Image: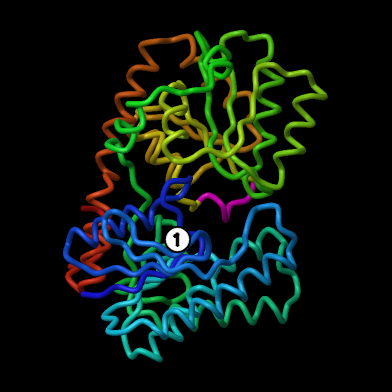
Amino acid sequence: MKLLYIHQHYEENKGATRSYELSKRFLEHGAEVVMISGQGDSHITKEGLVVKSTHTPYHQKMSTIRRIWAFIHFFLWSILLGMREKKIDKIYVTSTPLTVGLVGLILSKWKRRPFIFEVRDVWPDVPIHLGFIQNRWLIQLVKWLEMLIYKGATHIVVLSEGMRQNLLQKKIPASKVTVAENFANPLLVQESNEACVEDESLMHWMRDKFVVVHPGTMGLVNGVDYLVACAEKLKDNDLIHFLLIGEGSEKENMQAQIKEKQLINIRILDAKSKTETLQIASQCQMGTMLVKNERILWDNSANKFFDFLACGLPIVLNYQGWQKQVLEESGAGKGFAHEDVDAYCTYIEHLATDQHSWERASQASKQLAKKYDVGRIANRIWRVITNRRNSYVETLD
């Protein structure tokens, strides 16, 4: 089977490596995989994955106009590259942005081949609910485009049960939707830990501390300034530190707040490779995930949640939803209402001072990682691609 895989933000060794890890498993199943990516150079990986780049400039600090241009650039060039590809059997397209789904639909019609659409974020719901799209004509257009893509796809893969329910409410048949969450990769953590963290000043700052880590984007929807409030609240507790790793539109504002408040218990690092991030996270004691106080964001399935599980870290959230339920049922962590900063901080203090409770949560986290093992999730998607899925039980295997 020759699989054309389209992912504008494809990465191999940075924060989001889902497409890379899935492609490796597809290759192990005997598939030929060609990846159309927006960034980097065209190349062939050591596993045999063929990567063809559109060389589309993109980063988090771009203006809205430049981002739109980036989406248009990738849209046009990815269609051209896809049309040039010969003897394709299936097309696998992963969002965001939503326009990537239109690429899959066009290539599916041109090549007369089925395409599977992977929904990582339920767009356009998120930007509409957050007020990023307000024009009613534009809202109608993007909603029409969303349904056009869903109806044109042979099958749809979503990353959480909340996303699945969202699609069912839009009258998408249940038989057409499979849940395949992001995944935990303990082997990658183990390989990462074979090397030591080279930043000696960071290791000194972390030594003998209970460090709560947040790797990933620091954008508007992440609401990471929440940690500044927590750091200020806990500044008299010398044991607890907060560490952020990454880039984003809110990073400079965060740094300014930390400097203004003279907080020494919170630190921000520049973005690291996946390996470096896992090295650092493994030296921390707790992972945290944050979002703005918006219900639509509860259904996310961010990579860091599963990386924390792979590292055996207890997890604390400042929102509700499926991840809160999974954590609390397993004992691997807790979720709190966004406004309940006191309870959020109290839970961190509890695990920081009660070694027995921390060890139980850590073991629960490691156990939960098995449910989201990379091989298990990849096999579920492979069964979708090869038309061998049985039923909704695929989401529970």
The N terminus sits in image quarter: bottom left
Query: Considering depth in this image, is 233 or 203 the residue closer to the camera?
Result: 203
SS at badge 1: helix
Asked whether residue 96 is drawn in magenta, I would say no
Which amino acid is tagged 1? Answer: Met
Seen in the image, is 162 located left or right of residue 232? left
Residue 112 on image: x %, y %: 33, 90
Residue 49 lies in quadrant: bottom left
Q: Which residue in the structure is indicated by mark 1? A: 163
Q: Residue at x 34, y 70 (%)?
A: 34
Say which of 248 and 238 sits in front: 248
Q: In the picture shown, does residue 361 fall above or below 139?
A: above
Specify whether residue 294 is painted magenta.
Answer: yes
The answer to whether 176 appears left or right of 134 in the picture is left
Please report the residue visible at 78 percent of the width from the left and 30 percent of the height from the top: 257
State the image coordinates of residue 348 (x, y, percent, origin top left): 53, 20
Residue 380: image location, x then y, percent? 24, 59
Residue 35 point in image, percent of width and height: 38, 67
Main secondary-structure element of the magenta-colored stretch? helix
Looking at the picture, tell me which residue is in the foreground, 221 or 101.
101
Please tell me whether residue 299 is drawn above or below residue 274 in the rendered image.
Answer: below
The residue range painted magenta reads 293-298
Left or right of 8: which side holds 112?
left
